Amino acid sequence: MKRLGTALIGCGAIAGVHLQAIAKLGLADLKAVVDTNETVGRQTAQRYGCDYYADYRDMLKRSDIDVIHICTGHDLHAPMTVDALAADKHVLTEKPMAENKASARTMLEAAAKHTNVQLGVIFQNRYNPASVRMKQAIESGELGKLLCMKGIVTWHRSPQYYETAWKGRWATEGGGVLINQAIHTLDLLQWFGGEVESIKGSISTDALEGVIEVEDSAHAHLVFASGATAVFYATNAYGVNSPVEVELVFEQGRLHLLGDTLFLHQNGTSAVLSEPVPNDLGEKSYWGVSHGYQIRDFYEHVLEGRPYPLNGPEGYKALRLVTDIYESSRSGQRIRYPSLLNAST
């Protein structure tokens, strides 16, 4: 199988996960990394044996680069994606796909225009073994109809975390705990639940008031077209990074995900369906191990010429829910839509 030439933009913390995955793939050769911080960029290039660029546009001129990984601040995802797609490069961008819906729509338009290349959005938790098992239970109907769900994220972010210039600002991060940390859990709820009929929520800044201009806590209530409902709570105001909790209640049982361990509760008994996969991310273990699974899947789709399913429109769904929670909090109203699956507004 052909090997793809790859480049990565943004050499911050999450970049290491991408670069390790690329190195283990056997499907790609890392050609370059890009960062405006020359020291960080050159150190990363030396560590992974590739070229360094300060300006991503210079890197895009190379004909030996096929795939671009975007690991920058949220507000840079859209312009970099648009430029990369126009340069005939496939793009795999970190979540959220953009800092707001307007920027995300420029990415969707570019992807629709440049159909010879693909756009993928990172939501690696969909690839977790436990998530896959939960999705299978829904699709198979083995536990009956899905009735309701909950998703809970209680994490911690210190004031020092927001010393990075783009974080904690509406214009650049696009929000706080919702758009950055808890978007993964919100994405899982909508992936499990299907078409969303309406959402109502609110946000607040409880522990980081005066430090950030965005929220550190949020909650929401979702109604799905199937009749199922979900409650969602997220905060960065807890004292530690506690395991994420997701629960799915069916007519004939209950699936309870705590961290990476999935339990089935049925007929008065409990069983473990999925256990954690060891990882070497240390204190960042809450990122999980599934970046590698998703990156491999993206590359295989590109190499085989198959449309990648976690594409721009699919990645847009979670962003829309996030921004609609913000709008609902401002207006105090429930946001309703006839079809989120095909929405682009």
Image: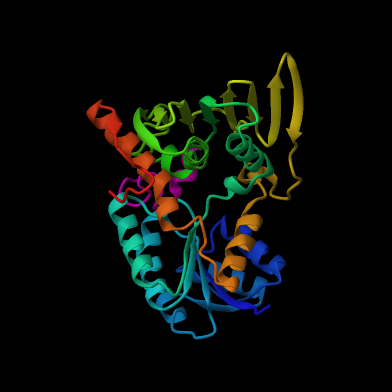
Question: Residue 281 appears at what percent x and percent y?
Answer: 69, 49
Q: Residue furthest bottom?
A: 63
Res. 327 in view = yes
The answer to if 81 sits in the magenta stretch is: no
Q: Which of 112 and 283 is in front in this view?
A: 112
Count of numbered labels shown in the rendering:
0
On-image quarter of the N terminus? bottom right
Image-based side of 267 in relation to 303, left or right = right
Q: Nearer the viewer, residue 126 or 145?
A: 145
Q: Which residue is rendered at x = 39% and y = 67% of the image? A: 80
Image-based side of 339 in relation to 68, left or right = left
Res. 198 image quadrant = top left
Res. 142 image quadrant = top right
Question: Residue 62 appears at what percent x and percent y?
Answer: 48, 84
Q: Residue furthest left?
A: 331
Q: Which residue is rendered at x = 64% and y = 21% of the image? A: 253
Question: Residue 118 appears at what percent x and percent y?
Answer: 47, 68
Image-based side of 113 in relation to 239, left or right = left
What is the magenta range? 158-175
Q: Which residue is rendered at x = 71% and y = 15% of the image? A: 267
Residue 68 against residue 137 in the figure, above or below? below
Dominant secondary-structure state across the stretch colored magenta: loop
Res. 31 in view = no
